[in-house]
């Protein structure tokens, strides 16, 4: 059985993830603090890639939590 200490060791070894959607959101903000529609249109393909990355990260995180819950039962 997986011990809590071993689980924490494994989780600590996971690499930090930088979600591009967060960085991109700041880049798409205009001087008024609102999202700039022109910037959004210009960077649409980057937005799609960043959204896909965020969705994959969320999916993988849910799966990791599911697996960890099974191991800890």
Image: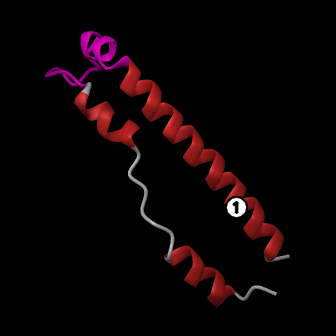
Please, is residue 39 above or below residue 49 in the view? Answer: above
For the image, the number of numbered tags is: 1
Residue at the image position 71 percent from the left and 55 percent from the top: 63
Q: Quadrant of residue 36?
A: top left
**Residue at the far right in the pictured view:** 73
Q: Secondary structure at mark 1?
A: helix
Crowd rating for badge 1 (residues with CA inside 10 Å; few <14, some 14–19, many 20+): few
Residue at the image position 79 percent from the left and 77 percent from the top: 72
- Percent of width and height locating residue 10: 59, 78
Please, is residue 20 above or below residue 62 in the view? Answer: above
Please, is residue 65 above or below residue 50 in the view? Answer: below
Q: How is the image coloured?
A: secondary structure
Please, is residue 24 above or below residue 66 in the view? Answer: above
- Report the magenta residues as a range: 29-44
Left or right, 46 with reference to 68? left
- Percent of width and height locating residue 13: 50, 76
Left or right, 58 with reference to 12? right
Residue at the image position 40 percent from the left and 26 percent from the top: 47
Residue at the image position 57 percent from the left and 38 percent from the top: 55
Left or right, 32 with reference to 63? left
The residue singled out by tag 1 in the image is 65
Left or right, 16 with reference to 28? right
Q: Quadrant of the C terminus?
A: bottom right
Q: Quadrant of the N terminus?
A: bottom right
- Percent of width and height locating residue 6: 64, 87
**Residue at the far left in the pictured view:** 31
Q: Is residue 40 magenta?
A: yes
- Percent of width and height locating residue 44: 38, 18
């Amino acid at each position: 059985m997986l011990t809590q200490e071993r689980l924490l060791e494994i989780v600590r070894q996971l690499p930090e993830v930088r979600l591009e959607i967060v960085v991109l959101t700041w880049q798409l903000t205009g001087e008024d603090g609102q999202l700039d529609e022109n910037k959004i249109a210009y960077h649409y393909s980057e937005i799609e890639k960043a959204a896909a990355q965020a969705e994959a990260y969320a999916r993988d995180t849910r799966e990791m939590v599911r697996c960890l819950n099974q191991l800890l039962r």
